[in-house]
Amino acid sequence: MKVAIVGVGSMGGAIMQGLNNLTKYDLIAMNPQNPRVEKLAHEYKFKLVFDPKSLIDLQPDVVILTTPAPVTVAVAEQLQALDPHTIVISAAAGIKRADLQAALVNNPVATMIPNTPVSVNAGTIGLSLDPKFDKPVKDTIVQLLNDLGDVVLVSEEQLDIVGVIGGCGPAFVDVFMDAMSDAAVKHGLNRQTAYRLIASMVKGSGALAYETHQSPATLRDQVASPAGTTIRGLAALEKHGFRYGVIDAVDQASDED
Ligand SMILES: NC(=O)C1=CN([C@@H]2O[C@H](COP(=O)(O)OP(=O)(O)OC[C@H]3O[C@@H](n4cnc5c(N)ncnc54)[C@H](OP(=O)(O)O)[C@@H]3O)[C@@H](O)[C@H]2O)C=CC1
Ligand SMILES: O=C(O)[C@@H]1CCC=N1
């Protein structure tokens, strides 16, 4: 399958890396000329073009739009001559399917919010599909995205909050991990040991919650032994407003103003 990525920045690059890991896709990309992207094209051996006509001439089966959100509808308008069978999937946060579909009247258009862990095929991808899509179109989209991570089907209205939890979430977790590593270094661990320990701990905690379906509160209670060390740390997190800080971070990231 020929997959084109339009806009090879943080998100487009992560998708490119995730698909490249599997070696089964014929990958192409469009980006303004930029040595960073040209280096990536050389490394991953994907075909890189710089203008919409060259992309259209390559007849991709799927086009993934990872351009900056404010220009994504304009980019879609430049792709109007795509073969009608080409499926277009936009990752642009806050950009509605109707606006993209108006620009690409002949193509099936889906909207998603992926996250950067797709680069290691461990992404979380909120996906909204038009209920009118044919089954083969739906299947193609879901199978492709399943190769990048966990696909969660949601309504288009839910994509905004999915974008904050799933899309911005890794950055919030990264701040938590960075703070934990400062604390570990303060207590004598070297940075590399701290990073490994913390990444492994976060990965394992996520896997436990994901696989057991137990609530975070239940899992927390299992760690906090009576009169033990964890409950003292949890009390300190409450004292410093950690929980409200997280809720406010989601509120602020959701605020469109
Ligand atoms: N970063 C993330 O974790 C997530 C991002 N998204 C969405 O992905 C999109 C990209 O975000 P992000 O990767 O962070 O941003 P970046 O700025 O890192 O990447 C944007 C890329 O698009 C390229 N670009 C700009 N204009 C055009 C154009 N007209 N045609 C083709 N390529 C173009 C840029 O080129 P250059 O800079 O080389 O000129 C750059 O490589 C946004 O819509 C965002 O909402 C969604 C979920 C998560
Ligand atoms: O920061 C952003 O706007 C994008 C959308 C979700 C994650 N990154």
Image (tube, rainbow, N blue to C red):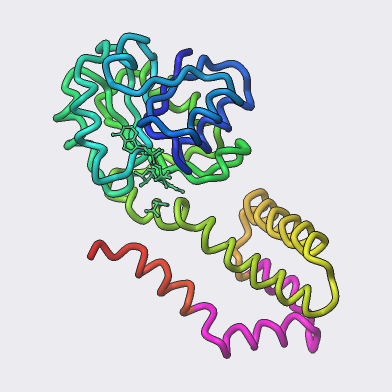
Q: Is residue 100 above or below residue 215?
A: above
Q: Quadrant of residue 140?
A: top left
Q: Is residue 200 left or right of residue 138?
A: right
Query: Does residue 67 belong to the magenta stretch?
Result: no
Q: Is residue 254 above or below residue 243?
A: above
Residue 147 seen in this snapshot: no
State the residue in front, 49 or 227: 49
Quarter of the figure with the C terminus: bottom left
Residue under the point 52% across and 30% down = 16
Q: Is residue 78 left or right of residue 250?
A: left
Residue under the point 57% across and 32% down = 17
State the residue in front, 183 or 208: 183
At which x and y percent is residue 222? 74, 71
Residue under the point 48% across and 43% down = 10
State the residue in front, 127 or 198: 198
Query: Does residue 228 belong to the magenta stretch?
Result: yes
At which x and y percent is residue 161? 36, 56
At which x and y percent is residue 163? 39, 51
At which x and y percent is residue 177? 65, 65
Q: How many marks?
A: 0
- Magenta stretch: dominant secondary structure: helix
Q: Quadrant of residue 109?
A: top left
Q: Which residues are magenta?
A: 218-243
Q: Quadrant of ligand 1?
A: top left
Residue 249 seen in this snapshot: yes
